[in-house]
Amino acid sequence: MQTPSHESSLNIAPQSCQSCRSRKRKCDKALPTCSLCAKRNRSCEYSRPEPLSHSATASIPERGWYPSPLDEQADIQTIDFPTILFLDPALLQHSLLETSSTVGTTVLQDILQLLGDLDEIQLTATRFFKHIHQWMPFISKKRFYDLYLQPSFRSRPDVVLLLLALKLITAFPPAVEESFSILVLQAGVLVALYELGHGIYPAAFLSIGACARYAHALGINVSRTVPTRRVLTLVEVEERRRVWWAVVILDRFVSIGCPGRPFATADPKLDDYLPADDVAWDQGTVKPDRFSTLSSPMTGHMSKFALLCQAARLLGQVLHHLSADFTSEDDVWIQLDRTLQSMLAAALNIDCPDYDQITFVYSALVALYTPWLSSDAVQKIDSHRSQRAKVILQQITERINANLIERQCFLGRDPEDMSPWGLYFAYRICGAHMRTSSKAPHGLEVARKLREGFMDIDVRWNVAGVYLQLLEAQEAINLEA
């Protein structure tokens, strides 16, 4: 066995690049650019850790360009626990799957400087336990001093966050002015969408909850007993309505892989108004006679966003059904199946299909059947539903080639134009075919194309790369089974 030459070893970095670390992807550490960054045309940087202050480095072993055991651990291909908990918690039942409860994130030096040196941190802790702790004792004083004040805290983002919070709560407040407006809520929705699309959990779940409360505080879609500011124009009325629907959509979709979590927003009512025509909305010419409700939608052309809102309401009903005793509610299951199938057929049989709505409906439909596709125990309870799930899987597989690939509804589109709605159903379809490939002739080919699509979409939405990791985990589990 030949040993690597000195020259070849110089072409390999001792640590993963920053891009691969942030995306939790396996890095080949090639210099000057790793193969994954080169393929994605991304900037590839290998940086040395920032130098620490003299007071801190006195008690910390020197860490330079060469790797330490902590660096080696960062390159282990694990999937963080919160991500699996939201995207596919069933994988946690398998002990073969290696998970990490902390994300391998480096704390920026600028943030560490906010804490000050060890003496300042000690002073903050003393002030907290002397004053705040007396009337709100929910932090273990012993664990705090035994664990969190050790020099290694600098590699723990959660400890740094706690220390920053202690500094905040013990400081006297400055005179500041806060903004309380729909613009802040819209910014929050964009942040939540960013976190959802890049697989940042549980932050996405928590951000959506914060948006829901903020919308309620603004008086958006609340009962008449809640005081609210008077709205003077129809455009503003429409904007507030659309912001509320955006929160509802995210609130349902963030739980699509883990039914049972409570929604932050109330279920839309039949008399709730749907968004008005998209073109009129963009032109600022919203008219009161063009409004429609969930119980009486427009019979003609409906706006793209209104159709997505209807699909989100159905997804909420699916998640409610799955979080209850879904094995015994035949009427609910049949009605949801029929409604989703009708919506899907209507969305496909038009000249210019709304691809984002189609993939959202696909995801809702697959979510309804996921228990019957993935669990042998559940399949034995009701062979009829199990058989129906296999039929639906085959139908979707056939439609993928006709509608999602040939029409470039899902694959082949510009990643910048794509929503993250279709990634869930694509993941479930791939997983189902991994288990039933021998019974589905075209299943392997469809799964292969979808996985290639994940790699392309990962450039825009990093959650696609996370789903690829979960598929690899499923393959490993299936091999060991």
Image: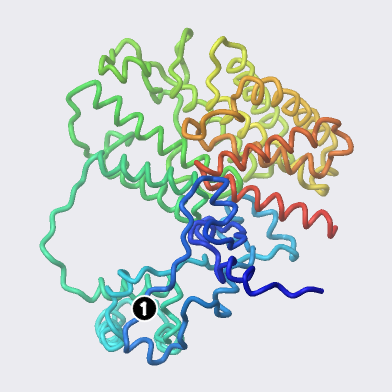
On the image, the x and y values in percent for residue 3 come to 74, 75
Image quadrant occupied by the N terminus: bottom right
Q: Quadrant of residue 269?
A: top left
Taking 332 as reference, is 181 left or right? Answer: left
Disc 1 marks a residue whose amino acid type is Pro
Image quadrant occupied by the C terminus: bottom right
Q: Which residue is mark 1?
A: 51
Instruction: Using a 10 Å C-alpha cutoff, classify the residue at mark 1 as few (fewer than 14 neighbours), some (14 to 19) or many (20 or more).
Output: few
Q: At 50% from the left edge and 25% from the top edge, which residue is drawn?
A: 310
Give the residue at the far top of this rendering.
Answer: 300
On the image, the x and y values in percent for residue 96 come to 75, 64
Taking 286 as reference, is 432 left or right? Answer: right
Give the residue at the far left of this rendering.
Answer: 175
- Judge by depth and name the residue closer to the eye, 107 or 290: 107
On the image, the x and y values in percent for residue 472 come to 71, 53
Q: At 60% from the left edge and 20% from the top edge, which residue is drawn?
A: 343
On the image, the x and y values in percent for residue 468 come to 65, 48
